[in-house]
Image (cartoon, rainbow, N blue to C red):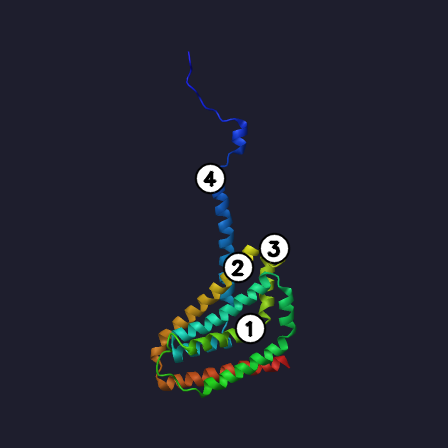
Amino acid sequence: MLTPFHWCPTQVGTDLSVSPLASTSFTIRETLVDTSFLLRGLIMGFSIAAPVGPIGVLCIRRTLAEGRTSGLISGLGAATADAIYGCIAGFGLTFISSILISQQGWLRIVGGAFLCYLGLKTFLSRPAKGAASATGNGLGSAYTSTFFLTLTNPMTILSFAAIFAGLGVASPGGNYMSAGVLVLGVFLGSALWWLILSGGVGVLRGKFNHQGLQWVNRISGTIIAGFGLFALLSAL
């Protein structure tokens, strides 16, 4: 009499089988690692961009005088430069960083002179009658000016290098995928700060009349020129 057939996996079949749950959990763990570096990069980028310096003053002034779009685009120029320096530090491009740091004196002189020019130009400029257009050379100039000014401070590379080394992604043998995710987070964190700053200052723009905006230009122009003079003196 035939008995019902009972299938029983062999030892070999058991060894060769792959658990979908185990594969899924591995993917989840890898995703969590990448998310962790992204969040760290967000915090880094936000923290580096937040202190008010010449770029912050420029962003505030342009937001008040020309509108939120001009202020945000100015901030994105700085965020792009931060991301470039983050790439140099995160991917161990020591040749480039050594050249930039060795020439930091000249870069400070160029950046300081440009800040003095912007400060004087801002001090003498007349308040705009309306917000800047969303297109045109004005926004391109706003982006490139802050991008250039941020690049004239190569010491930022050392800050990124120290942080990346602490996270274990700064050596040539490190995890370049993690470094890339971290750099993306730096850009997004910096951009988030400039979005918040330009949006918050933009709310106050309607409360400034023509005379108030004129004083904004004078005060911000003086501060920007002061940063430029300080950069020139520190380079000597």
Disc 3 packing (10 Å; few <14; some 14–19; many ≥20):
some
User: What's the amino acid at mark 3?
Assistant: Gly
Disc 4 secondary structure class: helix
The secondary element bearing badge 1 is classed as: helix
Residue drawn at 53 percent across, 81 percent down: 115
Residue, disc 4: 21
Q: Kindly report the distance in space between the C-alpha atoms of the residues bearing marks 4 and 1.
A: 47 Å
Residue type (three-letter) at the residue carrying disc 2: Leu
x then y, percent, for residue 165 = 61, 59
**In-image side of 136 versus 49 (left or right):** left
Horizontal placement of 90 versus 123: left or right? Answer: right
Q: How far is mark 1 from mark 3, CA to CA?
A: 25 Å
* Residue 182: assigned label: 2
Mark 2 vs mark 3: which is more N-terminal? 3
Quadrant for the N terminus, please: top left
Q: CA distance from mark 2 to mark 1?
A: 19 Å
Q: Earlier in the sequence, mark 4 or mark 1?
A: 4
Q: Point out residue 116 in the picture as x, y percentages from the top left corner.
A: 53, 84
Using the numbered discs, state the Cα–Cα distance from disc 4 to disc 3 in whole angstroms: 29 Å
What's the CA distance linking mark 2 and mark 4? 29 Å
Whole-number angstrom distance, CA of label 2 to CA of label 3: 13 Å
Amino acid found under the numbered disc labelled 1: Leu
- The numbered mark, 4 or 3, whose residue comes first in the sequence reads 4
Determine whether label 2 and label 3 are within 8 Å by CB.
no
